[in-house]
Image (cartoon, rainbow, N blue to C red):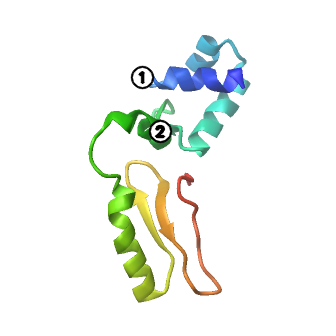
Amino acid sequence: MDNALRPLQLLRRAQPLTVSEAAAKSGVARSTAHRLSAMLKYRGFAEQGGDKAYRPGPVLRAAGAGARSGPDVREVARPCLEALNQRVGETVHLTVVSAPMCGSSTRSRADMRRTWDPGRAW
């Protein structure tokens, strides 16, 4: 568990972090740093840019947004998502464009549908 938290602490500094830097600063093997970074990315805690460096992802940014005022976009959009879902009878997703992660979802009534769980990155 401690190994997984080290890269997370490094990401909080909001500086781009390569796998090599994560390994050196965390005191783990590069392969371990790669696996941990990939899992943080998969779970939305990190994003990876074109330069292959990792940065804070939407989950980590949201955790730091507790002091931010204003409504959550998911709460504001929810009635619209539900209305659209009722109108078209299909699954409706809200996606944060800066990060490929489902923010909110309503399920289709159809037997065959595509679903994505809120908070899950793709």
Q: Which quadrant does the N terminus fall into?
A: top right
Q: Residue at x 49, y 67 (%)?
A: 105
Q: Which residue is mark 1?
A: 15
Q: Distance of mark 1 from mark 2, alpha carbons?
A: 12 Å
In front of the other: 38 or 90 = 90
Which circle, 1 or 2, is nearer the viewer? 2
- The residue tagged with tag 2: helix, strand or loop? loop
Mark 1, Cα crowd under 10 Å, few <14 / some 14-19 / many 20+, is few
Q: Residue at x 47, y 62 (%)?
A: 104
Q: What residue sits right under mark 2 in the picture?
A: 57
Q: Nearer the viewer, residue 8 or 75?
A: 75
Return the x and y of residue 4 as percentages of the image width and height.
67, 27
Tag 1: amino acid? Gln
Rendered position, 23 above or below 103: above
Residue 19 appears in view: no
Q: Could you tell me residue 79's position as x and y percent? A: 36, 72
Label 2: few (<14), some (14–19) or many (≥20) C-alpha neighbours in 10 Å: many
Residue at the image position 60 percent from the left and 37 percent from the top:
40
> In the rendered view, would you say 112 is above or below 2?
below
Q: Is residue 27 visible?
A: yes
